[in-house]
Image (tube, rainbow, N blue to C red):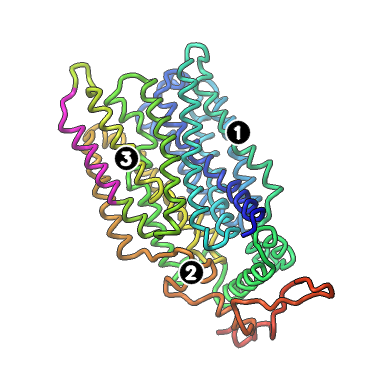
Amino acid sequence: MQKEKLVYNWYAAMVAAGCMVLYGFDAAIFNNVQINKQWLAWFNNPSGELFGLVNTTYSIGAIISGWFIAGPTADYLGRRWAMGIGCFITIIASFVQAFSPYHGIGVFIFGRVLIGIGQGIALTAGPVYIGEITPSEIRGTVMAFWQLFYSVGSFIAYWVNYACGKHTATLGNWSWKMVIVFQILVPIIIIVQLPFLPETPRWYIQRGNKVEAATASLRRVRDSEQEVQDELLAIREAIVFEKEVISGNYWALWKDPTVRKRLLIAFVLNMGQQLTGQGTLNSYSSTIYKKVWTSTNTINLINALNATFGILFTLNAVWTVDRFGRRFLFMVGGIGMACCMLMVALVGLETPNLKGGGKSEPVGIAIVFGLFLFIFFYKPSWGATTWIWTAEVFSMNVRSQAVGMCSQMQNVAQVIFNQFFPTFYQNCGLKSFFFFMSANVVLVIFVWFFVPETKKVSLEEIDVLFGGQNHIEKGGDLLNVDDPRHAAISLDDDGLKSGTEITHVEQPTQEIREH
């Protein structure tokens, strides 16, 4: 690929991936503030149940948004508009949380719901945009940065929190308000750059068959006119087939058995992402570390270092996901995480507690090392690959709705675990890690039997892996195209390539429609 177009393609994808920074930042915020004495005092030391509700309400807002709002928004207004709307709502919600009135925990909870809605929209449009704008041969590599940017968000939040925590006496309540206000930085950057990005060619064809706009979009991110016209033809063929033979609403998710199959698999994978233990650790690692370390600054530093290493570990997906495939990463990651959970539980349970509470420093370091090693296995596998697989397996007619619903199954699982984990951990301590160890083993078995490999398969032909029809070939039949994978290029008077010449194109007959 030409250097300037490759750079621009990566630039457009990275702006979209910035939406994941919002998720990583917000996921770290509550983990930070739950041990901040000023935050606890400002909201009148919320009880255990209310404490869990504050964390859960984000997921409720995201679930509602992902299931019912995000898909239609991305389909009707476009992927860019959906990302912009989600970012704007996130900015408003950040101010609502940061400036909640004294003892006004209800206002803070409302801000949590609102930010869940905004991020639910952005987190649906972002991966769909990346998948539709990126060539299939590097799609996995580019999508790996989606999870990387989650770690970037956590990195920013934890280090800002660590810096503010070092100056609590000077900052007072701003020691937690500043962490929350910092969340507006990335969505502002994204909104400013969205006008300079192309809308996806697939959306242009889907919404009104805007061929010229789709062609112009592809020319900004593809090398040759032949490549542009081949991809444009494949998109048109797939969308014609999907509109004529299938359908494009929520009912299609359940009506078509091949779509239903991949939807259910994606549900399991996305809920499995939380079953690994990562979501719970990200929300309650501070609570876990308090059993080992007594210093808040030490816990903040550990969390910040964890986020820093998370960025480095996620980079492993960049060079592995398109080389070894999605299934390989799922299974290796699951086995590695199971071993880490077993190690942490055994180290914590088989070593004595100190008289003043907590563990000795060598034991604490061993536990922290085990959890860091868990992140090493999680980030490139169930962290990055779950998003990659989910964003690429659905056909155009249901992609935004399906990605929105599947991604929010992570929050469905997180709502459940965030509610019961504090009690579970209080009663069982590190024995609770045996549950996550077992869950990871079960997930590896599930991938082995049910998850097909999607490495380097084009979006328009991925249905074949699940027993469906090839949308390019079937669409080519409907359009009466001689070669469904290669467009004929016509030349203008100056000998320049000027567009697609599809031979023998006819409208689908009534007989085909009825079929």
Number of callouts: 3
Please provide percent x and percent y for residue 104: 51, 25
Q: Residues within 10 Å of mark 3 (few under 14, many from 20)?
A: some
Asked if the magenta segment contains residue 380, the reply would be no
Q: In which quadrant will I find the C terminus? A: bottom right
Query: Which secondary structure, mark 3?
Result: helix
Which mark is first along the chain, 3 or 1?
Answer: 1
Based on the displayed image, in which of its 4 quarters is residue 73 positioned? bottom right
Q: Does residue 108 appear left or right of residue 232 in this picture? A: left
Give the answer, above or below, for where 29 lies relative to 400: above
Please provide percent x and percent y for residue 325: 40, 60
Identify the main secondary structure in magenta. Answer: helix
Please provide percent x and percent y for residue 426: 25, 31
Asked if the magenta segment contains residue 350, the reply would be yes
Q: Which residue is mark 2?
A: 462
* Amino acid residing under circle 1: Leu
User: What residue is at 23 percent from the left and 35 percent from the top?
Assistant: 430
Q: Does residue 27 appear left or right of residue 7 in this picture? A: left
* Amino acid residing under circle 2: Ile
Mark 1–mark 3 contact, CB under 8 Å? no
User: What mark, if any, has residue 185 been given in the picture?
Assistant: 1
User: What mark, if any, has residue 373 been given in the picture?
Assistant: 3
* Amino acid residing under circle 3: Leu
Q: In which quadrant will I find the N terminus? A: bottom right
Q: Which residues are magenta?
A: 335-353
Task: Name the mark nearer the viewer: 2 or 3.
Answer: 3
Give the answer, above or below, for where 25 lies relative to 10: above
